[in-house]
Image: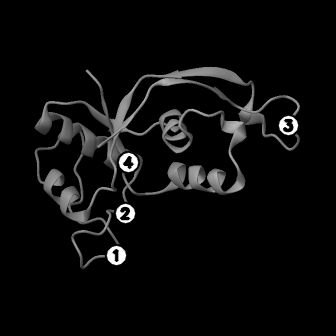
């Protein structure tokens, strides 16, 4: 786990930015509490171990990945609901609260709490990948 510091940043685009999207407005200040984020993607072996635990709300496929053959490969082909179930089971097992990574926390992790509109093209692609990837990212709340 990697500690991500809390802080504040401006989220959204300023009105003066050309080609801004409607979803980027209004620009507003966002506060993020410190949290821990997994440094590595969840492996197929880790997924299988948690999937074997008792169901909380839904069944989990213990081997959902298309690319099989190496337990150290990241798990893929899981949806949001599978990720929520995985986190619920992991939380019960560990006694700590795990949850999916929110977009605000993803921005904080990628940019170290710089404003979203300051992202360069490469960083925007990285953030888009964070938002859309099938790999499970997780975080734990600090007590």
| Gap between marks 2 and 4 measured at Cα | 11 Å
Q: Residue at x 85, y 28 (%)?
A: 15
Residue that badge 3 annotates: 17
Q: Which residue is mark 2?
A: 76
User: Is the residue 44 above or below the residue 118 in the image?
Assistant: below
What separation in Å lies between label 3 and label 4 (alpha carbons)?
31 Å
Disc 1 and disc 4: Cα gap in Å? 18 Å
Please name whichever residue, 62 or 18, is drawn nearer the observer in this view of the structure: 18
Estimate how packed mark 2 is, as few (under 14), some (14 to 19) or many (20 or more) residues with alpha carbons within 10 Å: many
- Which residue is rendered at x = 29% and y = 25% of the image? 142
How many residues crowd mark 4 within 10 Å: few (<14), some (14–19), many (20+)? many
Relative to residue 12, is residue 111 depicted above or below?
A: below
Q: CA distance from mark 1 to mark 3?
A: 41 Å
Of residues 110 and 25, the one nearer the viewer is 110
Whether residue 122 is situated above or below residue 139 in the rendered picture:
below
Q: Earlier in the sequence, mark 1 or mark 4?
A: 1
- 18 left or right of 95? right
Image position, residue 28 (x, y; %): 68, 21
Q: Secondary structure at mark 1?
A: loop
Residue 67: numbered disc: 1
Q: Quadrant of the N terminus?
A: top left
Nearest to the eye among marks 1 and 3: give it.
3
The residues tagged by marks 2 and 3 sit, at their Cα atoms, a distance apart of 36 Å
Q: Which residue is mark 4?
A: 137
């Amino acid at each position: 786990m990697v500690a991500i510091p809390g802080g504040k940043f401006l989220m959204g685009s300023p009105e003066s930015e050309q080609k801004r999207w409607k979803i980027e407005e209004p620009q507003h200040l966002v506060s993020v509490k410190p949290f821990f984020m997994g440094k590595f993607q969840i492996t197929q072996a880790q997924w299988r171990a948690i999937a074997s635990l008792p169901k909380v709300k839904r069944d989990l496929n213990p081997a959902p990945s298309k690319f099989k053959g190496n337990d150290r490969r990241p798990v893929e082909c899981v949806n949001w609901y599978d990720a929520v179930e995985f986190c619920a089971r992991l939380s019960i097992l560990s006694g700590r609260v795990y949850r999916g990574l929110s977009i605000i926390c993803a921005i904080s992790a990628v940019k170290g709490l710089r404003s979203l509109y300051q992202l360069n093209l490469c960083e925007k692609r990285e953030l888009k990948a964070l938002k859309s990837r099938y790999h499970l990212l997780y975080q734990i709340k600090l007590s």
